[in-house]
Amino acid sequence: MKPLGPIPEGYAAIEGVLAVDGRKVTELVEEAGGTPLFVYAGGLVRRRIASLRAALPECVALHYAVKANPFSPLLTLMDGLVDGFDIASGGELAIVRDAGIDPGRVSFAGPGKRDSELEAAIAAGVTLNLESENEASRALAIADGLGVAPRLAIRVNPDFDLKGSGMKMGGGAKPFGIDAERVPALARRLVEAGAEWRGFHIFAGSQALDADAIAETQAQTLALAARLTRESGVPLPRCNLGGGFGIPYFPGDTPLDLGMVGARLGEAMDALPPELAETAFCVELGRYLVGEAGVYLARIVDRKVSHGEVFLVTDGGLHHQLAASGNFGTVVRRNYPSAIATRFGAGPEEAATIVGCLCTPLDRLADKGGFPQADVGDLVAVFCAGAYGASASPAAFLGQGPAREMLV
């Protein structure tokens, strides 16, 4: 048997069935009208945010990265829990506006912003995190045509990256942000052009479980922000410190020591250089807020044995949970946390491979994991499905279509 990833805290069994926020998944599936189904636990999201608020310095605001999960009911929940929202496309701008979120609480990062996206964001009062000097010129010209002062910040490509990060977003040649040495001149140019100067966005990496590495990166980020402010001669109103807080997905992963991260950041905030004395700070998190609060449910439609190996064939698959299949950036495929939801808590009785309904060998949700014996009709649960699941997977592949989603 191959090991499975660790099931997040906060899940329990009721009468042998997985429960999400106190409700059996069999009931949720019936309410939703069937499987495949993503279920997001609002109670787990609230508890995660409360733990962050308790650990981080009070002066550090909390932003939600919409790309992690743009499900509209979830955004509505987040609207009352976080201080701001970060988007990465004009499509996400439309989504947050449809959810009733004030565009003034939104910032927009991402390379390759089209003129139409820049215009929509500027007109709405969104803060643009500029990714290049060319993008800055286009934004200023569009704002001039609209007759408004655009809210502009600079996304900085730092001279460092986040050690142990699953995805490195800074350091060296990158399509993201403006190289640090070119930032001071651009900051002066934006202010001289009459823009509403909003500060820096500095994001070095994501999905790190090493608290010491995150704390060191935050210290480097503060030092860089102070240096660039000093060199530009322009006061820094705001600084987005990025995120990078990871969650355990795979066997052997351990949860991030949030207390250490918060304590080290608190020490740094108590010793800010004079250039940052009046700066407002935030961290931008997506996966860490919602990833462990999501469960993907699929129903077993066939049980078969091939050359002595058991295959549990479900009505779901990689077209909904690309990351769990191992096809979303992982070099070596490892098992996500998963279980037989209708026999939750029962011990392993056999090695079984859980696959989806797609006609490709890539469609594996669990490889030779240890499970209680399951059969047609049982529900399979894949955990850590609250981030980069439904919206980050090829739902249209083979004409299968999207999964259902619900917030409880």
Image (cartoon, rainbow, N blue to C red):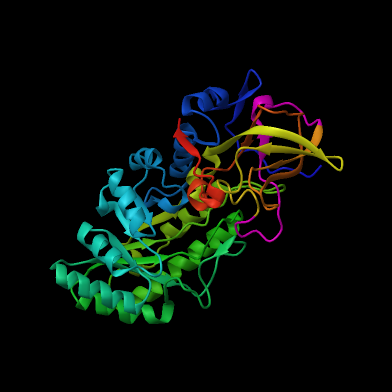
In percent of the image, x 24 and y 65: which residue is there? Answer: 119
Nearer to us in this view, 181 or 73: 73
Q: Which residues are magenta?
A: 327-349
Main secondary structure of the magenta stretch: loop
In percent of the image, x 78 and y 31: which residue is there? Answer: 348
Where in the figure is residue 67, as x and y percent of width and height?
Answer: 44, 53
Q: Is residue 329 magenta?
A: yes
Where is residue 73, by image quadrant? top left
Question: Could one spot residue 260 in this view of the protein?
Answer: no
Where is residue 13, by image quadrant? top right
Going by the image, does 290 lie left or right of 66? right
Going by the image, does 332 lie left or right of 404? right
Q: Tell me if residue 41 comes above or below residue 91 in the rendering.
A: above
Q: Residue furthest right?
A: 308
Nearer to us in this view, 206 or 101: 101
Q: Tell me if residue 219 comes above or below residue 325 in the rendering.
A: below
